[in-house]
Image (cartoon, grey):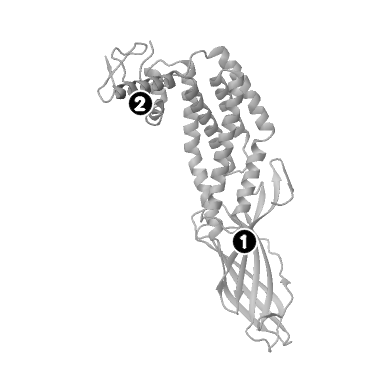
Amino acid sequence: MEEEQEESDIQKVLERVRKSEIPGEIVIVILWGASIATIFTNALFQNPYPTIVHYSLVFIVCLIGGALMREIGKALLGFFGAMGVAVTIMIALSSSPALSTLSPQGGAFIQSLMILIILRSTFPIPFIAYLVTSMFGALLGDRYLEEPIELGWTETAKT
Amino acid sequence: MVHDSNGQHLAPRGVAEKAPAPVREGWWMTLIPLWTWSVGELLMRRRVSKRTALALVLAVITMTSSVLAVPTTTNYFQFFNSLAQIQLNITSFHYRTITNPSEAIANISFTILNPTEYRGITMQLFEPIVIVLASNQTVTSPLGLSLAQQRSPLDPGKNVPFAFPFNSTWSQSWQNTEFVFTIQLGLSTFLDQAASIVATYQCVSNGTPVACEQAAVSIQGTASPGGGRAGGV
């Protein structure tokens, strides 16, 4: 009897999670941050500063991310979250060789240089521009995207 | 009736499946098909909301940029590895006194070798300083030799030779003579826009060919994206 009750509770929680907007928005923020990180990584590890193409791609990503959030407040939080995820991924990736045996003598200097490059590439002008873009995206999303995100979109076809 | 390649029934576009779909154990499971199914194909098969479709577009952008970032990240890791493994060797050492017994001419040949598979490092500056030790004492003041500017790509497995003569003092009374070279290699890399990389090597030779040891790798000057160097890191 208790087991059935527990199972039912778990089902209820799962169902609530499935219907909630929050898990979907967390996924969006992670995807948003990961895409910013990978686009910049593409640039930083070979140029080392991003080009106009990289900045434009991140602009599009921020527009999409903001639109998916649909609300200015959520877009703001989402943007900060995504930038946090992005900068963390970039710093972790650029620092990892300096922490490993691959590093030459003084690898820490290159690590600090990469951190400097990352901060210069993302702050302050691109950061502000992307923040505004995300807000604008939220306005567009609020206007044109009314439906909730369907996390279970692969399970059932919509009528 | 439409079937997929596995023979499973698929609902026509816009028509719901009659049988109820099984409830998934976790919502994150829904992300797995992203890795295996083509999103375009799925969007053709099932009607999804604009917001979900846009989320899928974001997922595809993330995956595509992640895949594209793999080679550049690998390249970056190889760059570090290569920087650590660049070898500097003294391949020949000729030292002979000239008519005046207190002077000598040295002809020393170095080779620089990149033993890794990484391409993208070019040697652009060779700046040696030498001191001579005899009986564990410095018998010459540090002698800065001529700065050699020579752009030579350090291609994988290729020995880049570097030879130069220099004049020095010499005394027949010196015992256990050692030549201590401190060599700074200015390297051109993908980081050039931001800073110059200098690898410092130490070579201690008693007049025979030796392998030098990498003492440090440092950065000289940093530049902003618009150019213009300032300060050091």
Under mark 1, the amino acid is Ala
The chain under label 1 reads: B
Q: Position of residue A63 (x, y in %)?
A: 58, 23
Q: Where is residue B225 in the image (x, y as percent from the top left)?
A: 68, 41
Residue under the point 56% across and 40% down? A90
Establish whether labels 2 and 1 are both on one chain. yes
The nearer-to-camera label among 2 and 1 is: 2
The chain under label 2 reads: B
Q: Mark 1 points at which residue?
A: B216
Disc with the residue nearer the chain's start (2 vs 1)? 2
In the image, is residue A38 above or below residue B89?
Answer: above
Q: Where is residue B155 in the image (x, y as percent from the top left)?
A: 53, 57
Residue under the point 38% across and 23% down? B41
Quarter occupied by the N terminus of chain A: top left
Quick check: can you spot residue B119?
Answer: no
Instruction: Give the numbered dot on residue A58.
Output: none
Image-quadrant location for residue B1: top left
Q: Residue furthest left?
A: B7
Q: Mark 2 points at which residue?
A: B25
- Give the distance between the C-alpha atoms of the residues marked 2 and 1, in whole angstroms: 54 Å
Q: Position of residue A79 (x, y in %)?
A: 59, 27
Q: Residue furthest front?
A: A2
Under mark 2, the amino acid is Glu
Q: In the structure shown, which secondary structural element does the residue marked by tag 2 occupy? A: loop
